[in-house]
Amino acid sequence: TVVAGLAGKIPYEKLTNRKVVCITNLKPAKMRGIESTAMLLAASDGKEGDDETVELLDVPDSVPNGELLSFENMDPCEPDGMLKSKGALKVWDRVKSKLKVNENGEATYQDDDTERKLLTSVGPITVESLKESIIG
């Protein structure tokens, strides 16, 4: 079960019957009394409250469910175990702060002068319209 605070941000029709990008090795958290076992990733324009625009990351339809994603020009690796400790969660926070959508609408990891696309086996993860935005 995944619980996300997207009410009023993304219409229900755009949340159902689609592929999504989730982080599944974070410690489960209770939201509204329901245990959420993953974090859904979405692009945001960075505004606060009702002014924020949010868009789910797009995964190509032909990607198998549960596929482990990778970053461009990096060797594939096994995911870390569940991130429970404060130190491990700080690492995730640092990684998350570098997840961005580039000017082409592609999800990327941007470190210093290097941009690495977030990739599936059939191509990049993209967004429909929120170019040059943050991912969280």
Image (tube, rainbow, N blue to C red):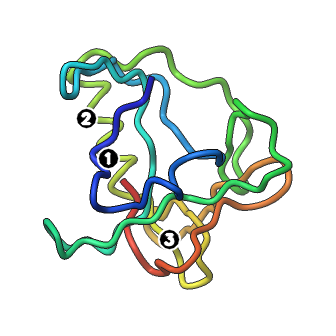
- Residue found at x 46% / y 22%: 25
Residue drawn at x 64%, y 45% as measured from the top left: 17
Q: Secondary structure at mark 1?
A: helix
Above or below, comparing residue 133 to residue 119 in the picture: below
Give above or below for 113 relative to 2: below
Q: Position of residue 136 (x, y in %)?
A: 36, 53
Helix, strand or loop status at disc 3: strand
Foreground mark, 3 or 2? 3
Image quadrant assignment for residue 77: top right
Q: Considering depth in this image, is 69 or 50 the residue closer to the camera?
A: 50
Q: Which residue is mark 2?
A: 90
Q: Position of residue 1 (x, y in %)?
A: 45, 23
Residue 38 location in percent, x, y?
A: 43, 28
Q: Going by the image, does 17 lie left or right of 55?
A: right
Residue drawn at point x = 79 percent, y = 52 percent: 61
Name which of mark 3 and mark 1 comes first in the sequence: 1
Image position of 62 (left or right of 128): right
Residue under circle 1?
A: 94
Q: CA distance from mark 2 to mark 1?
A: 6 Å
Question: Badges 3 and 2: C-beta atoms under 8 Å apart?
Answer: no
> Dots 2 and 1: beta carbons under 8 Å?
yes
Q: Residue furthest front?
A: 13
In the shown orientation, is residue 36 left or right of residue 18? left
Residue 103: image quadrant is bottom right
Label of residue 101 in the image: 3
Residues 38 and 4: in front is 4
Nearer to me, 94 or 107: 107
Tell me the element at label 2: helix
